[in-house]
Amino acid sequence: MDSNETSALLEKPSDVLFEPPPATTTTTIRIVKIVVEPFQWLQMLSSQLSPTFVFGVILVYGFIQGFSWSFFKVVSDYYWKDVQKVQPSVVQLYASLYSVPWVMKPVWGLTTDVFPVKGYHRRPYFVLAGVIGVVSAAMVAFGGRLAAAVALGCFVGFSAAVAIAEVMIDACIARNSIQFRSLASHLQSLCWFCSSAGALIGYSASGFFVHHLGPQVSFGLLVAPTALLVLLGFVIYEPKTTSGRSETKITDKLGLAIGGVYKTIKFPEVWKPSLYMYLALALNVSTYEGQFYWYTNPNAGPAFSKEFVGIFNAIGAMSSLLGVLIYHKTLKDYPFRTILFLVQLLYSVSGILDLIFILRWNMALGIPDYFFVVMDECVTWTITRMRWLPMIVLSTRLCPLGIEGSFFALLMCIDSLGSLTCKWGGGMMLHVLHVTRTDFTNLWLAILIRNLLRFSTLALTFLIPKASQSEVIIPSDLLSRNSTSIDGEDENLERVPSQC
């Protein structure tokens, strides 16, 4: 380069010498960052916790609670409707019995805390859950024409498999949320992101398989994911309790566990939000089965096909992913009371969409049924996930160390009792209003009552603490393992770097 060229370069403005990267390059970098970010997030959780624990969360919440449970709900609805041919109010009552194993979560929690198998509190019960799930699904799929009572027993058995598996992984989540408070919201985001992604696949596949295989044979597809729970029981890391405390009687351990639960639940910081969570779920009476029968009715309703029922549920599950992202990115730093009041208000308002649809006002507005129900599902699922996540984070904040499995199971039992109440209440309401397989005259009234009850829940938010989602809520002595422990000193655990 000669002196003239050098002088010309020196005379150029600095913004010419250092040009910004092209817009296409910037866009590519952003896309790569968006793609890589979830993997970096999982790597961060795995490095701070345990890779097998993260795998367990993905398996239980993604494949079991997400895919299997959503697939089960659609297939079981068609099984009762097309195979057993029962009324929607009866199905609503049957479906409420699926909640019984979830109401028994404290039993599963106490059992796993008090009765370890060869020193392990969680691993053997993952295996047990897998065996129950496989047997229950296989009996429905390959057992021929079952009596209604036998089929209901299998459905409750499958529900028990999902509930037991969730209690086990929730106990690990509760422990890690106590020990790593900054990761509590991250863990719940991971749980419900996996759940929503699994539900998206489950709902998408359900309509297709029901149409081509029938609802009964479709249950055979649930054997594989529940069998993975057996594998999880052998691979997930768990600190092993040594035999140093073998002289402790089982009755003493059980008494300590129950005493610790009773001691904790007496605190106002604990029972008030627990009461709110129960009432928030119980007052949201379910009208789902009446709406499902109306959706598929060729005379009174829009006569949606099996495939479309699966599709709009899948779109709703996709929207729940949006709810998880909204919570994770913008809402996880809000105080509990503020966020739960706002999302409950949105949830109450969103219920009006169901009323508009049942009254067919959407047709008067020129909105097709297919478009309106998809919009309704998107809004409802997004807000539902935004409403559920802070309640779960709050539940982890209420658990004492040492009996976290039992106590978190108790809180989930309270939630399950709320769900059981809402389903029984909804079933009774459909029965009283005479909503049947063919008569949907009063379905709009049932939905209106449900919406009014949702609004009434807003008056109960004073029971929720004002604390932020990263603050300690329960008294500090409950976070000491010795205050509620049933295994004694920590030296009785085999030490390795990873956490449960």
Image (cartoon, rainbow, N blue to C red):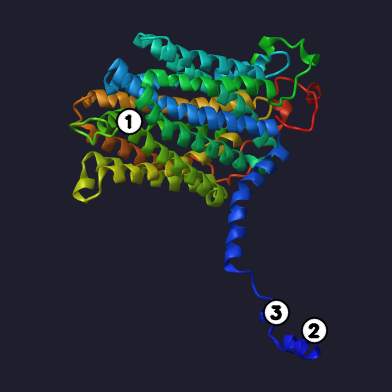
Give the structural element (helix, strand or loop) at label 3: helix
Residue at 25% across, 31% down: 294
Q: Which residue is denoted by mark 1 in the rendering? A: 306
Q: In the rendered structure, which amino acid carries the disc numbered 1?
A: Lys
Instruction: Return the residue nearer the eye: 404 or 477.
Output: 404
Residue 351: x and y in percent read 33, 42
Q: Which residue is denoted by mark 3 in the rendering? A: 17
Q: In the rendered structure, which amino acid carries the disc numbered 2?
A: Met
Residue at 48% across, 45% down: 323
Would you identify the image quadrant in which residue 292 lies?
Answer: top left
Quadrant of the drawing holding the C terminus: top right
Residue 261: x and y in percent read 60, 24
Instruction: Return the residue nearer the eye: 103 or 336.
Output: 103
| Mark whose residue sits in front, 3 or 2 | 2
Give the structural element (helix, strand or loop) at label 2: loop
Q: Is residue 96 left or right of residue 173?
A: left
Would you identify the image quadrant in which residue 53 lies?
Answer: top right
Residue 212: mark: none
State whether residue 122 appears in this view: no
Q: Which residue is denoted by mark 2 in the rendering? A: 1
Sequence order check, earlier mark of 2 and 1: 2
Q: Is residue 361 left or right of residue 270?
A: left
Give how far apart the Cα atoms at labels 3 and 2 are: 16 Å
